[in-house]
Image (cartoon, rainbow, N blue to C red):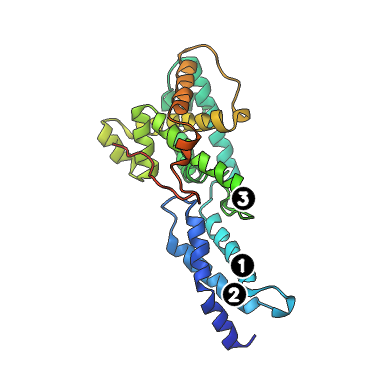
Amino acid sequence: MTPAELDAAVRAHLPLVGHLVREMLGRLPSHVSREDLVSAGMAALAHAAKGFDPSRGIPFGSFATTRIRGALLDELRGLDWASRSVRTRARKVETTQQELTASLGRTPTQTELADALGVAPEELKAIGDDVQRAVVLSLQGFTAGTAEDLVPERTPGPEDLILHREKIGYLHQAVNALPERLRHVVTAYFFQERPMNDIARELGVTESRISQLRSEALVLLRDGLNNHLDPHLMAAPERNGCVARRREAYYSQIARQGDLSVRLAHTTALGMPTSALPDAA
């Protein structure tokens, strides 16, 4: 292709960048910069034009799409910076917290949790801060936290779309079913992106207590969703004790909020949201 033809091809496919960015942003938290993704996509489109070989018989649009998707993934990998070791430590913290909650009959304090793990409270807080971005991606995008999971390899079929819509509906129900204070913390911190000290001041507690409530809510949300969507991921249930009874009551409360038609009502036939998650008020 001549330079003029390459320039024309780039101009003709500029809308492709916007389309791919919009497709990806629908599954990303609001703090991800649209401008950064568009910039990465535009650069990839220009590089695609330079590396395009018409003799291969591949349409330029398909060739450019692959390059743009790859560039957007690279951009997202910069956001998915929680290392394997950090995730491993986070799982250990979570398991220990569940064990202490079961033995104490209440949520352990940060000091108790740190003592059980054999770490300083400051290190425990650092672990929690390190994985917050991965947690938000998991909640809003239902992914394992890797950039590759954010871009589908194929166009979803009708069954995939229904399952995706049902997951979103269950998330609405799981958040709504949380105890009032936990629901307030989740919506304020994750979905309204308010600072932790602001939420603490509003509720009249310490930032450490907000962090504790946030962790407790995330464990409940995860188990609540798994209980209805992926029961095989659930640990063996505890049948006795007030903690076990509260969890069972929470799972039942999620189910009582509506059937499949109610869950699907949170999205359009194409999977776009029709309503926001609950307000923190």
Q: In the drawing, does residue 12 fall left or right of residue 157?
A: left
Return the residue found at the far right. 56
Give 112 or 187, whichever is nearer the viewer.
187
Residue linked to disc 3: 157
Q: Residue at x 59, y 27 (%)?
A: 234
Q: Are marks 2 and 1 in contact (CB under 8 Å)?
A: yes
Give above or below for 67 relative to 127: below
Provide residue 28's location: percent of width, then percent of height: 48, 51
Residue linked to disc 1: 67
Q: Identify the image quadrant of the N terminus.
A: bottom right
CA distance for labels 2 and 3: 32 Å
Q: Amino acid at mark 2?
A: His
Decide which of tag 2 and tag 3 comes sooner along the chain.
2
Q: Amino acid at mark 3?
A: Gly
Quadrant of the rendered image containing residue 253: top left
Q: Identify the image quadrant of the C terminus.
A: top left
Q: Amino acid at mark 1?
A: Arg
Closer mark to the observer between disc 2 and disc 3: 3
Residue linked to disc 2: 47
Give above or below for 59 relative to 154: below
Provide residue 113's location: percent of width, then percent of height: 47, 26
Closer mark to the observer between disc 3 and disc 1: 3
Which labelled disc corresponds to residue 29?
Answer: none
Q: In this orientation, does residue 173 appear?
A: yes
Give 109 or 180, whichever is nearer the viewer.
180
